[in-house]
Image (cartoon, rainbow, N blue to C red):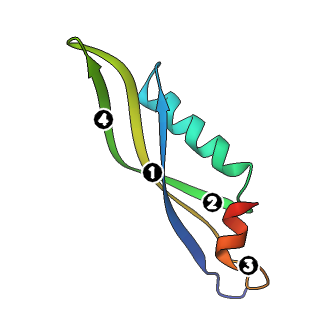
Amino acid sequence: MPDRVYVVNEIVGTSTVSWEDAAKTAVETAAKSVKDLRIGEVVTQDVTVENGKVVSYRVRLNISFKYHPEIAWYEEVQR
């Protein structure tokens, strides 16, 4: 089996429902434009507060996807 190389990028997902929903939304959105998305790793979680109440959840994730030498990584992200 040949060695594999992966690209790691950071993305942010938001949701008014939960951190899990924010992460799911971010990964599913990224998967539409990134080929061979493999891993989503939560880096941080935070909330937006207005008038003393949580109004949204935010998750910052590192995502990794398989490097394709025939496609420049910045072109792959734009797909």
Give the residue type that dot 2 points to. Answer: Arg
Of the image marks 1 and 4, the number of the one nearer the N terminus = 4
Image position, residue 45 (x, y; %): 33, 39
Dot 2, how many residues are within 10 Å of its Cα: few (below 14), some (14-19), or many (20+)? some
Q: Which residue lies at the image location 73% right of the left edge and 54% below the top edge?
A: 33
Image position, residue 69 (x, y; %): 73, 85
Image position, residue 62 (x, y; %): 46, 57
Q: Are marks 3 and 2 in contact (CB under 8 Å)?
A: no
Of the image marks 2 and 4, the number of the one nearer the N terminus = 2
Rendered image: mark on residue 68: 3
- The residues bearing labels 1 and 4 have C-alpha atoms spaced at a distance of 12 Å
In the visual, does 64 lie left or right of 55?
Answer: right
Give the residue type that dot 3 points to. Answer: His
Of the image marks 1 and 2, the number of the one nearer the N terminus = 2
Foreground: 62 or 73? Answer: 73
Image position, residue 4 (x, y; %): 64, 81
- The residues bearing labels 4 and 3 have C-alpha atoms spaced at a distance of 33 Å
Helix, strand or loop for disc 4? strand
Give the residue type that dot 1 points to. Answer: Leu
Dot 1, how many residues are within 10 Å of its Cα: few (below 14), some (14-19), or many (20+)? many
In the visual, does 23 lie left or right of 6?
Answer: left
Residue that mark 1 sits on: 61
Of the image marks 4 and 3, the number of the one nearer the N terminus = 4
